[in-house]
Amino acid sequence: KRTSTFPCYHVFYVLTQVIFVVLGNIFGLRQKFTMDCEMEEKLLNFDLETYISSYTGHTKLIRLKFIAQLLEGNVKVEALRLALEESKKGENTQLYIELLEKIGGALGPDYAADDDWVTKVDQRNNKRLKKLEVELNGYKTNLIKESIRMGHNDLGDYYYERGELQDAFKSFVRTRDYCTTSKHIISMCLNVIRASIELGNFLHVSTYVQKAEQTPDVQEPVVLAKLRCAAGLVALQSQKYKIAARKFLDIQTELSGAYSDVISSQDIALYGGLCALASFDRSELKEKVIDNSMFRNYLELVPEVRELISDFYAARYASCLGYLESLRPQLSLDLHLHLHVQPLYEQIRHKALIQYVTPFTSVCLTKMAAAFNTSVPGLQRELAKLIMDNQIQARIDSHNKVLYARHADQRSATFQKVLATGEAYMQDTKAMLLRASLLQHDLVQKPIV
């Protein structure tokens, strides 16, 4: 009696596939662990004081808190120390207490809780709040629009300084009904935008940016630049990278450090440069980025971004991707960009791969892997994904390690286009003849008078 060997082969095949999956997962985890270790090593040399010196006001504190949440060790303690020192310059005692709890005595007795300072600040601000509320009620009784507007504005400033952002937002919005000039409307919009950005409510940011842009006599370069910054952040959060790039690229140099309580000049170069690389084609990159004298001033502040854009345009992909990897640790600590680092990097890399293979009918994968500083199997997986997504018209010869382009038959495509144009022309001609015939025989419905 003969026994079938099929089950044995089937089991062997399944076991082989399982082994490959396990090995692949182990390799992936190992690669991820290696990347994480490399990133930690790069962050050890991260100059936190230099980085944070570009910011002022609330965004400085928020960014320091954000960095402390992401990192461990000395950098975390340093971020909390700087945040604690910065908080004592303001009026937000709740934030000061919160930071002390996070530090937990790690900075020694020199950074112990200053209860006297907290008590004095709270008492002073309680008196200030009562005074502002009494003044506002008086203004409302007298029905003086300008005084009511200023009263709500002062109350909004008070809540903003105390870190009560929701109340600050409401107070700033209430000034809208008492604005009498374009300048008042712009001031109201900028205050609401600033509070909304800190609240993370980018829908309100978008609404008030549009309201400010529609206000007549908005011609101050600094105001226009601030509005473009806010609009760029909205587009970035919505993953509309092309719109974000256009907004950041149009920011005038007059802004300089005038909006450092929201965004720094270096951020404009980073956000604008990376979004442009991920979304612009070669002609747009040349015209709107490389030849843009206004944006070039911002790029000078971040030489790595300037160099990676030049390398990308010049097809020096290994160098370009090297600059991107060197920037990754810093970008992962950015308040607005950290969630977009991976999608932006993937889009830039995919664009580079597409740009590399487009001019050729066949490409040696070994040479291409060397140009991108990667392995041939890894490159094959990336190219296969792009082919499946219909971004590259090609096929891969895995045995010979060659990529062959599939170019469309131009003669056949032209012939089909001519036939389609002819059919459309015939339909239009018949329609015109039918209309002329109806008019000739007076078969037209006339309006009833």
Image: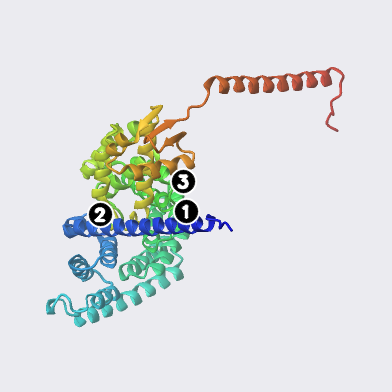
168, above or below 336, in the image: below
Q: Position of residue 139 (x, y in %)?
A: 41, 68
Q: Position of residue 164 (x, y in %)?
A: 36, 70
Which residue, given by chain and number where applicable, does mark 2 sit on?
A: 330
Which mark is drawn over residue 214?
3
SS label for mark 1? helix
Task: Name the kind of residue labelled 3 in the image.
Answer: Gln
Which residue, given by chain and number where applicable, does mark 1 sit on?
A: 207
Going by the image, does 126 lie left or right of 152?
A: left
Residue sitting nearer the eye, 256 or 360: 360
Mark 3 packing: few (<14 Cα in 10 Å), some, or many (20+)?
Answer: few
Going 26% across and 71% down the picture, which residue do you hit?
Answer: 91
Task: Name the kind of residue labelled 2 in the image.
Answer: Gln
Quarter of the image for the C terminus: give it: top right
- Residue 190 placement: quadrant: bottom left
Q: Position of residue 254 (x, y in %)?
A: 27, 43
Decide which of tag 2 and tag 3 comes sooner along the chain. 3
- Residue 392 appearing in the image: yes
257, above or below 425, in the image: below
Circle nearer the viewer, 2 or 3: 2
SS label for mark 2? helix
